[in-house]
């Protein structure tokens, strides 16, 4: 009885190890594909564009809600 339980526990641990290995490989994909760098560049460009729009909006008479929608559209359009 004990040996059967020990074998079942070993198989369970191997299964968990395989799942964790796949999860680790899945987590390495964003690093390999430079996803974090692309996200940082996108957010930086969105921030800079929002600042430019916020500065130029009063000059052209653009209402505040249009600036908010610009930022919302940028967040919704986040490429990930």
Image: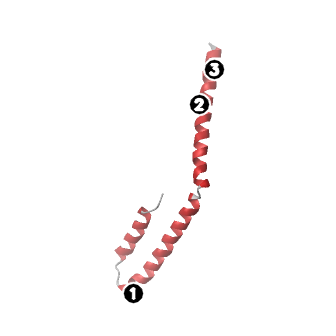
- Residue 39 position within the rendered picture, expressed as x and y whole percent measured from the top left: 53, 62
**Which image quarter: residue 76?**
bottom left
**Upstream in sequence: badge 1 or badge 3:** 3
How many neighbours does mark 1 have within 10 angstroms: few (below 14), some (14-19), or many (20 or more)?
few
- Residue 68 position within the rendered picture, expressed as x and y whole percent measured from the top left: 39, 71
Q: Residue furthest bottom?
A: 59
64 vs 4, left or right, is left
Mark 2 element type = helix
- Residue 25 position within the rendered picture, expressed as x and y whole percent measured from the top left: 60, 45
**Which image quarter: residue 4?**
top right
**Upstream in sequence: badge 2 or badge 1:** 2
Question: Alpha-carbon distance for marks 2 and 3?
Answer: 12 Å
Between 4 and 36, the residue placed more toward the observer is: 36
The residue that mark 2 highlights is 15
The residue that mark 1 highlights is 59
Q: Would you place residue 77 above or below residue 5 in this image?
A: below
Between 33 and 24, the residue placed more toward the observer is: 33
- Cβ atoms under marks 1 and 3 closer than 8 Å: no
The residue that mark 3 highlights is 7
How many neighbours does mark 3 have within 10 angstroms: few (below 14), some (14-19), or many (20 or more)?
few
Q: Would you place residue 1 above or below residue 19 in this image?
A: above
How many neighbours does mark 2 have within 10 angstroms: few (below 14), some (14-19), or many (20 or more)?
few
Mark 1 element type = helix
């Amino acid at each position: 009885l004990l040996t059967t339980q020990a074998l079942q526990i070993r198989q369970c641990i191997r299964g968990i190890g395989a799942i964790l290995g796949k999860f680790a490989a899945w987590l390495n994909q964003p690093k390999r594909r430079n996803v974090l760098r692309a996200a940082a560049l996108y957010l930086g460009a969105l921030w800079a564009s929002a600042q430019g729009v916020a500065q130029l909006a009063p000059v052209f008479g653009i209402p505040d809600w249009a600036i908010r929608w610009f930022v919302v559209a940028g967040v919704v359009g986040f490429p990930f």
